[in-house]
Each structure stands twice: as structure tokens, then as C-alpha cells.
Amino acid sequence: MVDVILIVIVIVSLMLAFAIGANDETFSSVVGVKRLTVRTAVFLGAGIAIIGGFFLSKNVGETLRNNISPDLPMQDDPVLISIYVAMSISLILASVFGLPISSTEALVGAILGISFAQGYKVEWGWSGMGRVLTTWVISPILGFTISFLLMKLVRYILKNTVRSLRQHETANSVFGVFLLLMVVWTGLSRAGNDINNAIAPIVPLFTATGRVGAADYWYSRIPLLIGGAGLGLGLIIIGWKVLKTLGNEVVELTPESAFVTEGSAALVVFTAVILGIPVSGTMVLVSSFLGAGMGMNKPINFKTIRMVVLFVLLTPLISGIIAVACYHGIRWLF
Amino acid sequence: MASRLFGYRGIQKQIEKKLLQFSYLPSKYFEALYIEYSTKIPCHTLEILEMEEKNVRNLLLKLMQDGQVDTKIEIEKFQLFQRINEVLSKCKEVRLLLSEYAEQIVEENYKRLLKLLKKISETAKIMHEDVDALYDDYELAMEKAAVLKEGCEKLLGELYEFKFCDVEGKCEYSFEDPEVLIGNSLRDSLQEMSYVAEKVVHIVTTFSYKYNTKRPGEKKSEKKQKEKKAKKKVGKEPKKNA
């Protein structure tokens, strides 16, 4: 029985890594300005996911933090599996439709679902849901506002400096290079952060081996490599849809607007981390697209935006329902 | 892939160089036609120019294909190239017609034709300067485009006189008259030059941060609103009458 559960945990860990990769929108702006084809972007993104996951993941084995429902036993296998399955299915479902969603949303939805179903107390204060809800409200506002203002500033600078087609092309080239560097860095750090959540349950399998020194270090990092590979595979197999939607169908990107989008998203997330304000990277990036689009007076495809918003609103609900169904299924089976 | 990552800057520079060379060819071509038909001494300049045109066109097409990333700026540059290419194809048409009918044109009209060729050559040079200015200074490009359009319109007016006058100075003509055939080709060349000016203006208004202040969709929505208002008015008027 224990072995079956262990196998299931390994599978769902990989599935979550795959799902996170499938919903990774980091390279969408580069695809939007045609600096990379979708195919090149997914393969490059996959490589970066493996490298970032393997080398930049600091807190190996850190489990999913749960401040929303403190009494919910997160280390309980059925609970853990249900949450992972719910998150994976929600992320993959959104990815199939090419829509970027926040993995935190799926996680919160799953935790809330099981907590409500099992009658566990939900912490609605600042330490729990209050903080999460603030994140969901603040992230889009900050992302939109900062990118809108930054776009206006960049346009003002360009208006006074770019006066010919030659200068325009040079500016595009410079912005394109900076954009790519920024995206590669974001991809590396993001893979380093995201991978922890997915591989947390399989980390214990690769520790306490009796090896010493470097051998132990490399052996303990095998889950990171597996997680990175899962992340990369998700990006290659389904992730291209999200890149295509966000890169091509929300707003017509130019190298400077793409740079502003990525730059403002990075700036908001970085500042928020320093100030201790909770933000969602995905929400900030998606709203940055809108802010940059508005800032450069480009028409915005509100049909796609409506779909994104709809999925953002539905994700916690879908994730919660799947988690409850999965939890009861496991309990019924074992 | 590295070239793509850097936005094909190297290729863009080559395209710029070749596009400028390409845009200078019509002026050279009309100048050569003017010299050849005013001196009546055949020379190889036109053949050399046609060879140059062929080489530059093929190279430009290859460069544009190599540096293709499907962005707006590349599409616009390709369309500009197409319009200059149209001017050149009309130039060659003029040459063919001249070689066939030049001797049939009456002397007075022939003199007019030579003057026109000289003026068209000068106008074509403005077209080249306009394309050059597009890469150097948007403001200057807009000014040159206005001068080019004005020059084309003026010459089109002169062509009108040229093609309508026959041997006896009567304003009757046949579509098979050499003057009419050559005149029509010259008119086509001038119209294509005018289209080049329009394309330059379009590129400046699209990409210049100074000119491009309105949303692309804004004009359409304004039109739609006007149409809606007009429809409402039309719908209301009969009721009032009734």
C-alpha cells in the first residue's frame, strides 16, 4: 500500500511540474515581438527550466506553505495528492485553452475546497486568506499601473530621441536584446522557485543516502533535475499555447512595449518582495501587457482578456471541486 | 538564431543600403533616357542600369527573406520596395515604347517629351531623397514626400497637355498614337512615384512617436460612430415627415 502511494506521489509531483511548465508565460513577450519563434521559445524555455530548477533552487524540499487552513494536515498523503492533482488539472486545463493562470490560485482553491468539505477552519485574517485576496487585488492594479506609467515614460524618451527609421530599428534591436536577457533571467529564477512546490514530496526519497560530500549534494538534487525536466516537457507539449495567446492575441507588441511589460513585471515583483507585499507573478505580467498596450495607445483584444479573467475567477472553484472529488476518491479506494 | 535574436540588425543595415540604391535607379534611368533621346546616340547606360536593377532587386528580395520576422516594420519596408519596383517596371515600359515609337513623334511633341523626361528624372531624384530621408529624419521625409507629390501632380498636368495635342495642335487623339502610349506610361511612372511618397508618409505616421498618437482602431470606431449617427438621422427623418 505504502509503495502504491509513493508511486502516486512521484507521478503527481511530475504532473504538477509538467502543469506549471505548461502554464509558464515567461517567454510570451519574446514570442510576441517575433524575436523567437514559438518552437524556439519553448525549447529554450525548457532548457532554462532545467538549468534554473537544478542550479537556482535554494530551498530544496520546502513543502507547500499553508496558512489558509492551519488545521488541514498537508502532509497527509490523500490531502497532498488531491491538492497536487487539482492544481495540475486546473493548470493544464487553462494551458489547453492557452490561458495563463496563477498556480497560487489553483493551490488556494484546492486547500479551500478540502477545508470546506472536511470542515476545517479557514483563516480569513491577514495571515491567511486576507493576504491571498489582497494579492489577487493588488497584483493586477500594480502590474497595470506601473507598466502603463513606464510605457508612457519610454514613449516620451523615444519621442525625443528616435527621429528616423534607422534610429527606430536600432532602438528595436537594443530593446530586443535587453528583453531577451530579462526573460532568460526571469525564466531561470522562476524555474528555481516554482520547482520547489512540485518536487517537495519526492525530495525525501533522495536524501539520507549515506553518501558524503559532492556525491550527496548531486544525489539530493536529482529531484530538481526531474522537476526541471517535467517543467520543460510541459512547456514544450502544451506551453506553446499560452505563449501564443499572451504573446500574439492580447495586444500587438513592439520591442519597447515587450521590454516595458517584462521590466515592469520584474520591478513590481522585486519591489513587492522587498516591501513584503504579496503579489502574483502571473497576474502582474498579464496586467502589465494591458498597461503597456494602453500606454502605447494600441488596440487591446478584450475577447482574450475576458477569457483570461473568466479563467482567473473560475480557477479556485474548479481546483476546489477537483480537490474534493479526488480526496473522496482516494479515501474510497484506500 | 543569433541573428534573429539581435533583430537581424546586420541584415537591416544591408537592406537600408540596397533600398537606397534601388530608389535611386528610376532617376538614373530617366536621366539616361533623356540623354539618349536628346542626343540620339545609343549607349549602354540603360542596359547597365537594368542589370544593376536586377541584381539589387534579387539581393533585396533575398535579404528581406533572410531577415523576415513578420513584424509591421518589415512588411512596410517590403511594400515600399514593391512600390519602387513598380516605378522601375514603368521606366522600362517607357524605354520600350520610346525605342518603338520615338521616330513617329512629331518634333514639337518630341521636344516636350524630352523636357518631361528631364523633369521626371528630377522628380525621381526627389523620390530617392525621400526614401533616404526616411532613414535619416522623419520630418525631412514628410517634407520631401509633400514635394514629391506636388511634383508628380504638376507633371501629370503637363502630361495631360502632351498627350492631347496631335500634329495640327488639335485636341483629338487615338489610343494608338505614340504620344498617348508613351504619355500613359509616363503617367503610370509618376503615379507609382506618388504612391512611394504616400507609403513614406504612411511609414512615418505609423512608426514615428511624434506622429503616431492616435490608436489604429480609433479612426475605424470614429467612422462607425458617424455611420451610426447618420443611420439614426435617416431613420428619424421619415418619422418626422410622417
Image (cartoon, coloured by chain):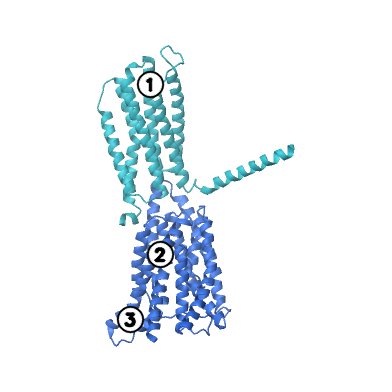
Label 3 in the same subunit as label 1: no
Q: Residues within 10 Å of mark 2 (few under 14, many from 20)?
A: many
Inspect this view and state whether residue B224 appears: yes
For the residue pair A233 and A283, the one nearer the viewer reads as A233
Q: Are marks 3 and 1 in contact (CB under 8 Å)?
A: no
Q: Are marks 2 and 1 in contact (CB under 8 Å)?
A: no
> Would you name the residue on which mark 1 appears?
B113
Give the residue displayed 52% in from the left and 61% down from the top: A307
> Would you name the residue on which mark 2 appears?
A238
When asked about the image quadrant of residue A46, the answer is bottom left
Q: Residues within 10 Å of mark 1 (few under 14, many from 20)?
A: many
* The C terminus of chain A, quarter of image: bottom left
- The chain drawn cyan is chain what? B
Query: Viewed as shown, does residue A328 lie left or right of B24?
Result: right
Coordinates of residue A301 in the picture (x, y in percent): 51, 55
Inspect this view and state whether residue B140 appears: no
What element does badge 1 sit on? helix
Give the residue displayed 48% in from the left and 83% down from the top: A332
